[in-house]
Image (cartoon, coloured by chain):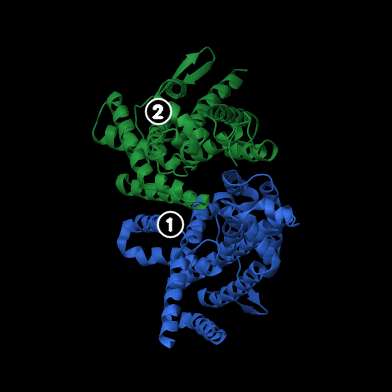
Amino acid sequence: MKKRTKVLLLTGLGLLLAALPVFITNAYAIIVINQTLISIIVLMGLNFITGLMGQMNLGTAGIMAMGAYTSALLTTKLSMSPWVALISAVLMGCILGIGLGYPSLRIKGIYLALTTLGFSEIIRLVINNLVDITGGPTGVRNIPCFKLFSYEIKGAVPYYYLLLIFVVVMIVIALRIIHSKWGRAIKAIKDNEVAVEACGIKLSTIKIFAFTLCCVYGCIGGALYGHLIGYISPTDFSVDTTIRYLMMLMIGGIGSIPGNVIGAVVVNVLPEALRFLGNYYWLIFSILILVSSVLLPNGLVSVIKMIYSKVSRFAVKGEK
Amino acid sequence: MTSFFQLLLGGIGMGCIYCLVAIEYTLIWNASGLVNFAHDKFIMLGAYIFAGTLVLKLNLPIILAVPIALFLMAIFGSVAAMGIFNPLSRLNSNIYAVMGTIMLAKILGEATRLIWGPAPFNLPSFVKGAYKLGEVSVSKVYLLIMIATIAILLIIEFMFKKTKVGIAMRCVAEDKTAASLMGVNVNKNITFTVALSGMICCVVGILIIPVFNVSLGMSTMIGLKGFAAGIVGGFGSIPGAIVGGLLIGIVESLYSGVGPTVYRDVVAFVLLIGFLLVKPKGILNSKASK
């Protein structure tokens, strides 16, 4: 694509996103969009490990829970500013990443999947049972919203703009990392670990780096989720949440950032669009996802790429 | 001392359940290289077919209902194998396979909710009560579980050692390429294994009805702990599954005698992660692949 068209397309998309709340006045729809934006952030983190490094991670829910509870408890119990709490959530992500990355040095494949699943369940059970600190099954209520100087970012629409800024920044960071030497090393691990080590790249550093990225993204997503809803409970972070994120990853296309965005949008918005099916909407949705994962293993992004290459070939023919 | 034996017996009872769960997915893992993340839904489906349809709706006697439920689950297993497990085992990345079985679990859960309704129910007079053995009381359920587990283990052992199908299954577990070169139909093998696994799931489902009631989430914890049992014992080996299951059941039960009960469910996962860090190959150093 020419650079000018690219810039034009991106500007158009940006304007469209900025004007979105003008077209959509339904409050519930805005909340769904906000959740989609948070999903994009968490999903990009998962993409580093499962998509680019090819290691199964089934601990997304646990990571999100740690981020969400760190931020929520610091703001409600110690009445810290949400911004400080967000930074603490990032720190928590770093700690988690090193903790989860260490086992990944010794185990992989299905073992790692089950370890992370176990980690996620332990986190949920501990949160559920530490009633004095976390409130147990009743959860944490009245999580305050972000403040910019004296302006309170309250309500769905202002929060939408805040999340939009976060998502754009996180996408840019993720893209920069993927196209750096770190990102190339992460991708190389998926293909051949021995070759990576033979090239003089320290495997353990890269793996722990990727896990830390995943956890930081997950914790930021979790913290933002807590401030979006204003209430969190352990049921928000069950195995189902992890499965939702894996679905998004599959649907969009493993290992690509545009794929992540598409996946998050489809998995968050499509069930709402299928609501007219009544009781059957989740069943139909699951079947759609299963069929598409068997027929389209590279996700929706591969379809878009195929259409794009056909169109551009057609355009080249027309010029001749 | 009495309470110790009491806890030990309860632990062995639950341990047997974890054993069966671990065996059921180890069979599929050995045949196809897939981990069946839908196995807890298989268990749930077995229980719902048995309790919801055969016993409560059709009023069949339990002696008749058990074989019919087993038969239905075997058919269901072979259909699932042909539609989902066979195509997935040919894909080259294990992420797709994991996703496929997870989505199958979602679909089963939703379908069950739509067919039988979301409210949990119970079979009122299905294996209730306990025997007194001196000071220790043994509940009939746990006794039944132990007997059923031993019976299933003997059947599997006999099948693996004596029958042609069982020997073929062992060959496939050892080396798929070599097995197919020796004339073993690997696809048919997968279908048969998933059907067998479905039957074991059905047995587990029926056995846990008196312990957990029939509900949509009845088998989630058992499924996860079954995974832990497989890892602790040694992934991909049947003896490992037995040892791991019993160990987790007993440790968990004895723990509830000393520590706060609320953390009872955490024990299995702590064991899982501990073993993965210290001894990833499990207690019985199995030859499990990567």
- Position of residue A25 relative to residue B280, above or below, is below
- Locate residue B286: give its quadrant: top right
Q: Are marks 2 and 1 on the same chain?
A: no
- Locate residue B126: give its quadrant: top left
Tag 2 secondary structure:
helix
Tag 1 secondary structure:
helix
Which chain shows up in blue? A
2 or 1: mark nearer the eye: 2
Circle 1 is placed at which residue position?
A293
- Colour used to depict chain B in the structure image: green
Viewer-proximal residue among B198 and B202: B198
Circle 2 is placed at which residue position?
B165
Residue at 37% across, 67% down = A273
- Position of residue A61 relative to residue B197, above or below, is below
Identify which amino acid the numbered label 2 is placed on: Val
Could you tell me if residue B69 is visible in this image? yes
